[in-house]
Image (cartoon, rainbow, N blue to C red):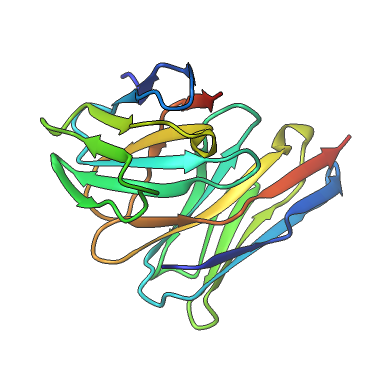
Amino acid sequence: GAGVSQSPRYKVAKRGQDVALRCDPISGHVSLFWYQQALGQGPEFLTYFQNEAQLDKSGLPSDRFFAERPEGSVSTLKIQRTQQEDSAVYLCASSLEATGNEQFFGPGTRLTVL
Amino acid sequence: GENVEQHPSTLSVQEGDSAVIKCTYSDSASNYFPWYKQELGKRPQLIIDIRSNVGEKKDQRIAVTLNKTAKHFSLHITETQPEDSAVYFCALHSGGYQKVTFGTGTKLQVIP
């Protein structure tokens, strides 16, 4: 079946613009994660959903970042008033169950803020 | 939050030699320890994982060992091949749900 998909794959935004990044997890996967990966660094946890419930948003860098998964499947990460430091690859991952197992990553969205 | 230290940051080996990457952590509640391989511009992909009730796991040329007492786990790649060249990340899951922390990565270069 299809893996995790993300769109757009590349996004260029002017500083101050709002952006929305989409993640389509594997069908039936309970858990969904968002990560931010800066160049040369490991993925940094942003937020975690179990079905439609956002159980952890402790990694969101500021209140400009907002994520939702209203129907427990597709998720959107929104960044308001983008800043240059928001430039990174945003990775989405899903896993079948709620606790400790393999995560399947999407290809990421590379965000560049000018 | 959870702290994960990964060493070395870069590693060059001759083709056929072994490579070992080590991660140490602090949260004794951590219960799942995956390793990911990430090629340039690609997504991370799971290569092997281990749970807290197991000390060692092997899959062909790849093995992972876990020492819960000392709070470290290691990735071992034997008979390295050029296609093993990539960045490798350790990670761990802790807490009642899946708070995931990644290591800082090891860039492995296998020299033909």
Q: Is residue B29 left or right of residue B33?
A: left
- Please name whichever residue, A104 or A50, is drawn nearer the observer in this view of the structure: A50
Query: Which residue corresponds to the image point at 54% horizontal and 45% vertical from the top-left?
Result: B36
x and y percent of residue A60 in the render?
Answer: 35, 48
Q: Residue at x 37, y 52 (%)?
A: A59
User: Residue B89, image x and y in percent?
Assistant: 58, 50
Q: Which of B106 and A36 is in front in this view?
A: A36
Residue B83 at x, y percent in the picture:
72, 32
- Residue B6, position as x, y percentages in the image: 63, 61
Q: Nearer the viewer, residue B81 or B109?
A: B109
- In the drawing, does residue A11 fall left or right of residue A65? right
Q: Please identify the quarter of the rendering in which residue A30 is found.
A: top left
Q: In which quarter of the image is the C terminus of chain B?
A: top right
Furthest residue toward bottom: B69
- Picture residue at 62% right of the left edge, 38% below the top: A39
- The quarter of the image holding the N terminus of chain B is bottom left
Query: Residue lying farthest front?
Result: A16
Residue in the picture at 71% in, 38% down: B84
Q: In this view, does B108 lie above or below B71?
A: above
Q: How many marks?
A: 0
Which residue is more in the foreground, A64 or B81? A64
Query: Which residue ends up furthest to the left in the rendered image?
Result: A71
The correct choice, above or below, for A4 with respect to A92 in the image is above
